[in-house]
Amino acid sequence: MPKSLYTELLNSRGDAGNLESIFRSRKKSDGGRLNPISVTQMVKAAAIRVGLSDKASAHWLRHCHASHALNRGAPIHLLSQTLGHASVATTSKYLHAKPNDSSGLYLT
């Protein structure tokens, strides 16, 4: 996340304490916290609105983040740390072979 976005999110907290959530539920019954089912419903609804699959989920977005970051050259150890993986081996599942890519391209 760019530092400017992080700063903007922190500033949007207003008078909220450091331990309070940045994104809050409007439902008081949940203590103001978003629950995983609500987040999934919001992501699916947003995906459908923009013409994406209704199979979209927050976890799907996490996978997209990982795959795109690696495709754009992010170091795997940094991504592993960002995702909170205990092992780089877990993160390595995001290393996909690309149809037009080959290790032979690196033998020049």
Image: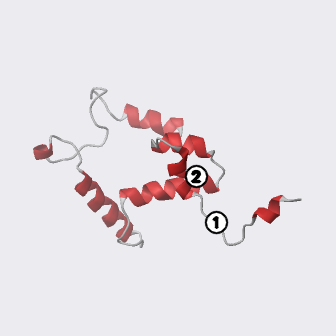
Indicate which disc residue 18 carries.
Answer: none
Pick out the residue farthest to the left: 29
Residue drawn 52% across the image and 53% down it = 66
- Colour convention: secondary structure
| Residue in the foreground of this view, choosing between 46 and 77 | 77
Q: Position of residue 102 (x, y in %)?
A: 75, 66
Q: Secondary structure at mark 2?
A: helix
Q: Position of residue 14 (x, y in %)?
A: 31, 30
| In this rendering, position of residue 34 left or right of residue 44 | left
Q: Position of residue 107 (x, y in %)?
A: 85, 59
Is residue 1 visible to us here? no
Which quadrant of the view contains residue 95? Answer: bottom right
Residue type, numbered disc 1: Ala
| Residue in the foreground of this view, choosing between 81 and 14 | 81
Q: Dividing the image into 4 quarters, which one contains the C terminus?
A: bottom right
Residue drawn 37% across the image and 56% down it = 58
Q: Which residue is mark 2?
A: 69
Q: Is residue 101 above or below residue 82?
A: below
Q: Secondary structure at mark 1?
A: loop
Which quadrant of the view contains residue 16? Answer: top left
Indicate which disc residue 97 carries.
Answer: 1
Q: Is residue 71 above or below residue 18?
A: below
| In this rendering, position of residue 47 left or right of residue 99 | left
Residue type, numbered disc 2: Ala
Residue drawn 61% across the image and 53% down it = 70
Whole-number angstrom distance, CA of label 1 to CA of label 2: 15 Å
Residue drawn 64% across the image and 65% down it = 97
Q: Earlier in the sequence, mark 1 or mark 2?
A: 2
Is residue 98 visible to us here? yes
Q: Position of residue 27 (x, y in %)?
A: 14, 48
